[in-house]
Amino acid sequence: MKIHSYIRYCLFLLLSVFVGNGSFVFAQNDPQVSMYWAVPTLYNPAAVGCDSALHISAFDRMQWVGVENAPQTFFVAVDMPVKIKKVRNGVGAMVMNDKAGLFNTTQLGLQYSYSLNLDYGRLALGLQAGMVNQGFSGGEIYIPDGDAWDASADGLPTGDVSAMAFDCGFGAYYEWNWLYGGMGIQHLAESEIELDEYAFTKLKRTYYFSVGCNIPVKRSLFIVQPSVLVKTTMQALQKEFTLRATYDHKFWGGISFRPKDAVALMVGADVGAVRLGYSYDIGISPLAKASNGSHELMVTYSYKLDLDKQKQHAHKSIRIL
């Protein structure tokens, strides 16, 4: 069996399981991002305005290259700090489009964070609100030949359908000296998106836990930057361990490991106010035999703002080094 037919066959099996009683239900999962540390606002709204700079970031991820209908993700994120009555706040926005199989999902989120200065570090609490639009190409469903497969099963859309629903999230972000960490909750309301009378999807609530640090190496121009990201829906769990190093605040590289999934190699450079990055995922799962790995490109523009004259922490941030 060719790999393209195999993927379609598995997709139909998945749809058949969910159809069951005449309704098509699909739990939507968030896309994978290897350079997660570069845009923490993607999964934690409390990270907006985490340093004294305006950030404009664009990511493009091509997953499992060589596999038909493999996931493709593109998103743009903007955030910056603002001061309201001497209190530090952060505002941001993100737009993401994710294509996976027969699904096409577009997410729009507006973000806000409020900071609390503690004796040891800073704590920020954040909210996110927006919309998610999801489409399903029912006309492209592949049904194998044979009497065992019912092409007229109720619940399977036979044409292109789409619908929209409200979405929201919450987060907490902490930083102190060279240490940072946080927790983000995406799809807090677990909204359902009704595609048609018998078919709907559900945004699965997803929890993100992250921690990392920027450790300067004495008598050198290197900064060592280990980090960990844990993502869970309370049914599925994914862990990612990353080790990076930056040289002279200009060049950086690293390696990331996701158990049972992939090893990612990443390199990049800061050219003036622009950060460029590239990541290549080497698959270690059974799917690796059918794909040529995953590629990820990142471009971030940062413009420093003079908001904290008394306490400049920009050089310690994960966003500006």
Image (cartoon, grey):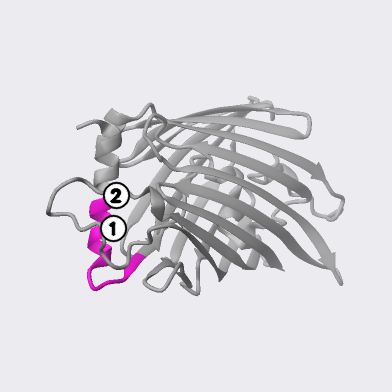
The residue under the point 67% across, 67% down is 118
Question: The residue tagged with tag 1: helix, strand or loop?
Answer: helix
According to the picture, the residue beneath numbered tag 1 turns out to be: 15
Pointers 2 and 1 in contact (C-beta within 8 Å) = yes
Left or right placement of residue 231 versus residue 13 in this view: right
Q: In the rendered image of this protein, does residue 4 appear above or below residue 204? A: above
Indicate whether residue 76 is drawn in magenta: no
Q: In the rendered image of this protein, does residue 11 appear above or below residue 184? A: above
| Residue at mark 2 to residue at mark 1: CA–CA distance | 6 Å
202 or 214, nearer to the observer: 202
Indicate whether residue 24 is drawn in magenta: yes
According to the picture, the residue beneath numbered tag 2 turns out to be: 11
In percent of width and height, residue 106 lies at: 57, 55
From where the camera sits, is residue 233 visible? no
In percent of width and height, residue 93 lies at: 69, 58
Left or right placement of residue 11 versus residue 169 in this view: left
The residue under the point 57% across, 38% down is 60
Mark 1 burial class by Cα count in 10 Å: few <14, some 14-19, many 20+: some
Q: What amino acid type should be assigned to the residue bearing mark 1?
A: Leu
Start and end of the magenta stretch? 11-25
